[in-house]
Amino acid sequence: MSDGLQICIHKGTDQIGGSCVELQCAGKRIVVDLGLPLDAELEATNLPDIPSINSDDASLVGLLLSHGHRDHWGLLPKLPPAVNIHLGRKTLSIMTAAAPFIPGGYAPAASATYSDGQTFDLGPFKITPYLMDHSGFDAYGFLIEAGGKRVYYSGDIRGHGRKAALFERFIKSPPGNIDVLLMEGSSLGRLRDEERFETETDIETRLFDVMKTTSGMVLVACSAQNIDRVVSVYRAAKRSDRQLLVDAYAAEVLKATDTKSIPKPTLEWGDVKVYIPQAQRRFLKEKNIASLVDAYKGRRVFPEALPGEAARSVMIIRPWMLHDLARAGALDGATAVWSQWDGYLKDEAGIKFVEACAASFIRFETIHTSGHADPHDLKRFSEAVSPKKLVPIHTFHPEQFEGLFANVVRSSDGEWFSA
Ligand SMILES: [Zn+2]
Ligand SMILES: [Zn+2]
């Protein structure tokens, strides 16, 4: 192989999930993302064939993580601990806070954090992170320069979230002279070319409408790590004179954002409280983290008070909590809002949740928008970057790229090409 910059998409040329890209220049390598495919089990999934991972030739100079979604970090637990992981400071903080609560939770042992716009070197690679709008918090794309070539990795992006200004900032002054753009295309095959996704502001309005017309508690089933969505829920709750209730997992994730404008159960946010379901109380003890709740002192709502608080509350839940809320007698007149990908409703837990809501006469609504750019915004993104080569990644429909974008060159998983 030549000394120039070489690229290999190990996974992601024809699927969403499991993204992994390796770049090589002058005998040194970096890996960008090391995700777990969406439907795969960690134990049963092997690392991509990256010889430098297990060799002591020191050719692997680091791993770049774009953001904290499992389809980008899921295989990191299989890396030898000596490999240094470079990630955003808030991504590290959220992964660390979430780790005890989620199955297969993980936070890197050896890590270094990077910042928006701050260029750093890894061997011959010069890397500049760009903070972007995405449903995952603290999500970045990377400009990677080496061997006289310039590559841009989009990471996961959108232009219709609460940080749309970051997307517009990028479009206005994109990195120039890009030889290769690796661009995600999650929305292809999900939307017609000119169909647009609703914005997070639209979602907030629809949540508000439901809260206004619900006599009891509003239960929102969303990911606590979708911080944009939690903010939409909080703002709609505030407009409808309701407080926001979160469990210990969501409380820890929100605190870990370490961002002033994000609601969290602390003194400054009088209308955010913590409700700990019974099963979670046992779980915290088993995990030896029961002392976490000391920090929620004066900010708790206990089960006996819940029926009285229900009509002026919105709770962020996961499906298993419904049983606990029924036992607390807090579901009279409640509405449940499914506020995540509706594909999960076809899983066993999703099906059970819909059935349990129906059995308890709980009104059921779906209010959600995608974490990924629609084709319209992907076109704007690719035209702004105007690369010599655009290589599809993170998509189930790479064949649709040619019809939408210029200079498309498709690659296959595991194939090396020159920048
Ligand atoms: Zn993502
Ligand atoms: Zn992704």
Image (cartoon, rainbow, N blue to C red):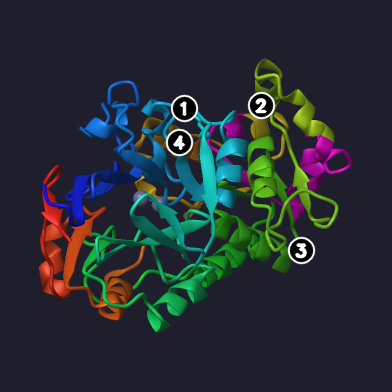
Dot 1 or dot 2, earlier in sequence: 1
- Distance from disc 3 to disc 2, alpha carbons, whole Å, reads 28 Å
Q: Residue at x 60, y 29 (%)?
A: 323
The residue closer to the viewer here, 321 or 266, is: 266
x, y percent for residue 394: 26, 53
Q: Residue at the location (57% across, 46% down)?
A: 224
Where residue 104 is drawn, which disc sits there?
1
Please tell me which of labels 3 and 4 falls first in the chain: 3
* Label 3 CA crowd tier, 10 Å (few <14, some 14–19, many 20+): some
Q: Name the residue under label 4.
A: 355
x, y percent for residue 139: 47, 57
Mark 1 crowd level (few <14, some 14–19, many ≥20, 10 Å Cα): few
Question: Which element is circle 2 on?
Answer: helix
| Dot placed on the residue nearer the N-terminal end, 3 or 2 | 3
Q: Distance between the residues labelled 3 and 4?
A: 29 Å
> In this view of the protein, can residue 48 be seen by the observer?
no
Residue position marked by numbered label 2 in the rendering: 280
Quarter of the image holding residue 143? bottom left
Query: CB atoms at circles 3 and 4 under 8 Å apart?
Result: no
Q: Disc 1 or 4, which lies upstream in sequence?
A: 1
